[in-house]
Amino acid sequence: MTTLFDPRDPAVRTDPYPVYRRLRETDPVHRSDFGFWVLSRYADVDAVLRAPGVSSEFYRNPSWAQRRGGLDSPLVRSVRSWLLMLDGPAHRRIRGVIGKVFTRAAVDRLRPRVAAETNRLLDAAGEGRTDLIASLALPLPVTVTCDLLGLPTDDRDRFRRWTEQISRVIDPAITAADVAELNRAETEFRAYVTGELDRRRATPRDDILSLLAHTEVDGVRLTDHEIIANVLFLFVAGHETTVNLIGNGLLALLRHPGQLKLLREHPELIPGAIDEITRFDAPVQIASRLLDDQVVLDDVALPVGSKVMLLFGAACRDPERYADPERLDVTRTGIKNLAFSGGPHYCLGAALGKMEAATVFRALLDRYRVIELTGEELCWRPNVSFRGLERLPLDLAH
């Protein structure tokens, strides 16, 4: 018997959309061979994201925690305090503090820095052949996150290495070798940020790490463990989504030259086009939830205790929600984008990530008359929750 959806299948990484379409059309509320319910329709994914009695605290699942080193491993101890993995009052408390990092004013203050760093990286890339992932998409967001938090940008390569390793924590295809690497990376990251936090305790600065160290919610400060865990979460969330948004987005535009030409001729469309680019090839493909209460979707009742896999990438191409969803249309309106999740866990950093991507696309189109794929085979990273390219080899000319 053929498995209808196997997230470990290399074909799903390369091009998941035919699989998603088959799921939507034949078994949209799918009971997988791996014990998950798999949801592929927009309305169902949106409903679960917003339903009461739906939990993000996946570490409560014994097998999930055990596969990542156990409940008391460095990695799972950190994850247990991540904003992403908390519900109810605990989630609202930490979100209330982290939300101060991502105000509209804070994002606006970063615009000149993002533009300057983008231009610096493009100056270094120059003309001719370049891998846009290595030369721009990878270094930019980790530098921006360092700036945001007040951490030394000289150490961005270390942060990037730790982040790339630890981001595998939510991947359903994680291996034992991954787990050892992830726990080692978390321990190293924690030691580094502990030193920085100690310095902020002694001498506060005008930066976000100092804000996190001293802000109170209802008279209670975050613990050092909570701060360090969520600094790590900010790196993972800001890094993975933005790298993939830039890489996937530019690839989509290069494969749709009419849309790229439209943005070149009308750069004022770029900010609004980011939602469509994100919808078309979502940087985050999969999220999971536990059901503490029953959820009914049409005539299917998902029982208490169910593990549910939400396919953001499938929902974003649901023809019941979007007309002609397989077509990239940078002038599309009415996008309510699940690529940044929804409900109480809507991504706090969505505005920052979209601003970074818009800055990059505008700079590329301003600077280069020619932006072309080299024809080399494209390879997707071995992470099914996040969808992103290993490399994006381009030919560039002024």
Image: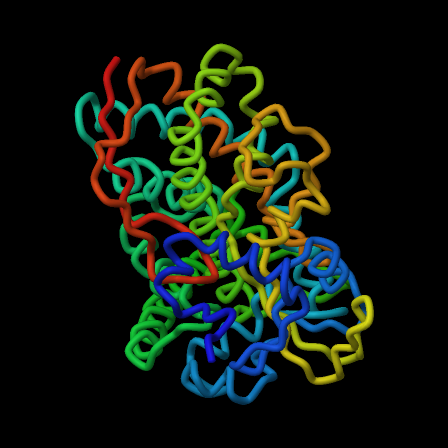
Q: Could you tell me if residue 347 is visible in this image? A: no
Residue 195: image x %, image y %? Answer: 38, 63
Image side of residue 5 versus residue 120, left or right: right
Residue drawn at x 53%, y 68% as measured from the top left: 224
Q: Nearer the viewer, residue 159 or 200?
A: 159
Q: Image height check: is 147 above or below 180?
A: above
Residue drawn at x 45%, y 56% as measured from the top left: 386
Image side of residue 184 versus residue 345, left or right: left
Q: Nearer the viewer, residue 77 or 333?
A: 333
Residue 124: image x %, image y %? Answer: 22, 27
Quarter of the image with the C terminus is: top left
Q: Residue furthest front?
A: 1
Residue 219: image x %, image y %? Answer: 75, 64
Q: Could you tell me if residue 87 is visible in this image? A: yes
Residue drawn at x 39%, y 14% as measured from the top left: 366
Q: Nearer the viewer, residue 310 or 223?
A: 310
Residue drawn at x 46%, y 75% as measured from the top left: 2
Q: Image height check: is 146 above or below 221?
A: above
Residue 90: image x %, image y %? Answer: 70, 70
Image side of residue 371 versus residue 220, left or right: left
Choose top left, top right, bottom left or bottom right for residue 298.
bottom right
